[in-house]
Amino acid sequence: MRIIKASEAGEAEVERLLTKAAFDEVELNPKIREANKKTFGRDMTAAELVRQIVGDVRREGDDAVIRYTHLIDKVDYKPEDFLVTEEEFAAAEKAADPAVVESLRKAAANVRRYHEEQKPNSWMTYREKGSILGQSLIPLDRVGIYVPGGTAAYPSSVIMNAVPAAVAGVGEIIMMVPPKNGKINPYVLVAARAAGVKKIYKIGGAQAIAAMAFGTETIPRVDKITGPGNIFVTLAKKEVYGHVDIDMLAGPSEILIVADKTADPVYTAADMLSQAEHDPLASSIVITDDAELAAKVAEEAEKQLAKLPRREIAQASIDRNGLIVIADDMMQAMCFANVSAPEHMELLTAQPFQLLPYVRHAGAVFLGAYSPEPLGDYFAGPNHVLPTGGTARYYSVLNVETFMKRTSIISYTQPALEDVSEDIIRLAETEGLQAHANAIRLRKREK
């Protein structure tokens, strides 16, 4: 675990280490690249491969989806096999542990209650001489949710994406999940039912994103695509953006912990590793003003690492992106934290709420020793789909408004328009737009 002192390294070097790229195309694993070369007949970067898949699905529809699902997922489909059937839902309910199902339903209820409180309202105000201005909040007609499912299953991601869409009033929510041996994890299906998803397609990867973006003979086109995925999914979302909206280009998971001398090093190390086990590219950082705590956290992280089932992944993450920074004081620590703009920020200090006003850039903030990041991942209610790679400087957490659009409302009476006509005509003519000016001038009353 790297430990650096800000006073020795200098603020500029610390800030460089804390600044992450918003989204980078990572170099593919050589084994994956060689497999792709055999499959597709030539060596391609991930972006080139995704561009080909997206283009083929746009042109060929279901045929391309079937072809790529066979090539990549080794599953042979016909179009009628895409959708999860009622029998599959029933089998999932039967196979699932009732205790896990109950926990999923509790989590969904918490997420729904939190997001109900977010829901914005349309409004109108009456102004001078009968004019009316306002804003209408309109839910999207159809959205598509992508849920990873190849090497792991994430029912929590189903809840976090689908529930806000349902609360927003989206007309139809469809979901794409890559199959594993032709099947979908039962808890993903149970979570989808609990969240109100009606149609689930057993399709993954870039072909799933392209199918939702452009539509096929059997898959409807959506207005927006949300949800996490691997590099191919993320690049596909980037490729189709503009044809549809997307939530964000999510990178590897991140946690940044601001801790003072009162922080428990066992808790602090555990919270670092909770993100490190996600991905070798995940980032786990502690910023503290206490050198003794820094040493204890590093030591404790090594102890806990040795016992983790996903030790190899977590170790790679810590070796690559694990970092402990010793700041001069807590105000400098908060400045560094804002430079990083992390996905998850924990404040493990004696008085965390005193530091909250100094948080400028973070996807979610967890205050105190008993608010660890996994609480937000699964159960508390706020969304766990968060901006990564420093994009918390300008992106927000996934929320109800993600699934809505704003439409302006303008209504003027003739007296109200008369009152402002000369100003509008003057501005239009200044820009050389005479037809704009005429549209106002013709409505003026003769005096």
Image (cartoon, rainbow, N blue to C red):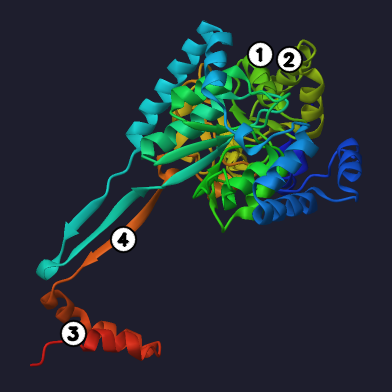
Q: Quadrant of residue 431?
A: bottom left
Decide: is 377 above or below 243: above
Q: Earlier in the sequence, mark 4 or mark 1?
A: 1
What residue is rendered at 76% in x and 13% in y? 309
Question: For the residue marked with disc 4, what is the amino acid?
Answer: Ser
What's the distance in space between the residues labelled 3 and 4, CA to CA? 22 Å
Q: Which mark is residue 408?
A: 4
Name of the residue lying farthest toward the left: 447
Identify the residue position indicated by label 2 in the image: 300
Q: Which mark is residue 266?
A: 1
Image quadrant containing the N terminus? top right
Residue 355 appears anywhere in the view? no
Q: Quadrant of residue 170?
A: top left
Q: Which mark is residue 443?
A: 3
Q: Earlier in the sequence, mark 1 or mark 3?
A: 1
Decide: is 417 above or below 123: below
